[in-house]
Amino acid sequence: QLDGELTYVQQESEFFDLDKSQYGLKEVRCEVWEGFIFVNFDNTAVSLTDYLGAYGKGLEGYPFHEMTETYSYRAEIGSNWKLFIDAFAEFYHAPILHQKQAVKDEADKLMKVGFEALHYDLQSPHSMISSWGGMAPPKDMNMVKPIERVLRSGLFGPWDRPDIEGLDPLPAAVNPAGAKPWGVDEFEFFPNMSLLIWAPGWYLTYTYWPTAVNKHIFECNLYFVPPKNIRERLAQELAAVTVKEYALQDANTLEATQKMLETRTVTEFPLCDQEILLRHLHKMAADHVEEYRNASVAG
Ligand SMILES: [Fe+2]
């Protein structure tokens, strides 16, 4: 029996008037969007579909269900959960922080011309950013490392798009600017889920679970269409380890930033326009905290 009823109690007669029907598993609110299961302890919250809003609606029909080959990473991080979202929600850091990932000529070019994402959008409390991604495949093979040339894969994923329905055309919310050199969309579903849809036909999620004000558990899950042969599998594995390498570089500064914040020596950060999603995240979080405080005072 799998409906959560309590069916057996060891030495039941030693309890007094035990009514087993009262001690089954507690029900929690649970809703499904495109195969993702969301649990919500707040029974008065709006429906999941309403909460996910325009992005949720606009992503419907993406072939999530075809992408059942998964790779997962999980880390305990000594920083507030918002710091890791900050590290992922802009791409302006890439030319400096990830410069060793590119072959030298390409890294130098990026340093000189700078970096600008393709598109930014806010649908409070959520937000999204689109970035270009000319590396899948690159215009010139000399732009990428030998292993990427051999396996036809890299950070942006395996270069050969899987032949499945739902990728052409993509749902309306994907690549909203209709940009030709589009490579990836990152949707920040407030508060703690990021969904990245990559041009070559795969996706990943990041989830951030706060365990203390200065600690969280980070989870990264990558989803691909199951490989049909060894070469496709190796291409996916290269994408998975490359994403992990980038994420380690992104995570590298988090604990130091947290320590610095805790000294309260630095109290302000300047943020540029490319970091609008960070400003939005902190505004949303601050608004929620204020709403909670006001409700507590009123209560
Ligand atoms: Fe990064």
Image: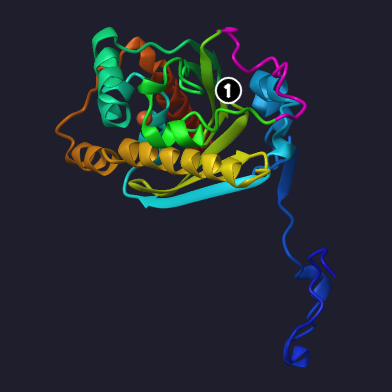
Q: Splitting the image into four quadrants, where does ligand 1 fall?
A: top left
Identify the main secondary structure in magenta.
loop
User: What segment carries the magenta color?
Assistant: 163-179
Q: The residue tagged with tag 1: helix, strand or loop?
A: loop
Figure check: 162 above or below 13 = above
Query: Which color mode does the image show?
Result: rainbow
Q: Tell me where residue 28 appears, x and y as whole percent.
A: 71, 52
Residue labelled with disc 1: 199
- In this view, the residue in front, 247 or 188, is 247
Res. 7 image quadrant = bottom right
Answer few, some or many: residues within 10 Å of disc 1's Cα (few below 14, many 20 plus, some between 14 and 19). Answer: many
Q: Tell me where residue 119 appears, x and y as whole percent.
A: 50, 10
In screen coordinates, is 114 left or right of 74? Answer: left
Label 1 beta carbon within 8 A of ligand 1: no
In screen coordinates, is 96 left or right of 155? Answer: left
The image shows a total of numbered marks equal to 1
In screen coordinates, is 121 left or right of 142? Answer: right
Figure check: 127 above or below 177 = below
Answer yes or no: is residue 50 visible: yes
Q: Tell me where residue 254 appears, x and y as whole percent.
A: 29, 40
- In this view, the residue in front, 161 or 147, is 147
Name the residue located 31 percent from the left edge and 49 percent from the top edge.
Answer: 78
Work out which quarter of the rendered image holds the C terminus and state it: top right
Name the residue located 47 percent from the left edge and 19 percent from the top edge.
Answer: 133
Identified by mark 1, the residue type is Ala
- In this view, the residue in front, 98 or 84, is 98
Inspect the magenta stretch and tell me whether residue 166 lies in it: yes
Inspect the magenta stretch and tell me whether residue 266 lies in it: no
Q: Tell me where residue 71 appears, x and y as whole percent.
A: 55, 48
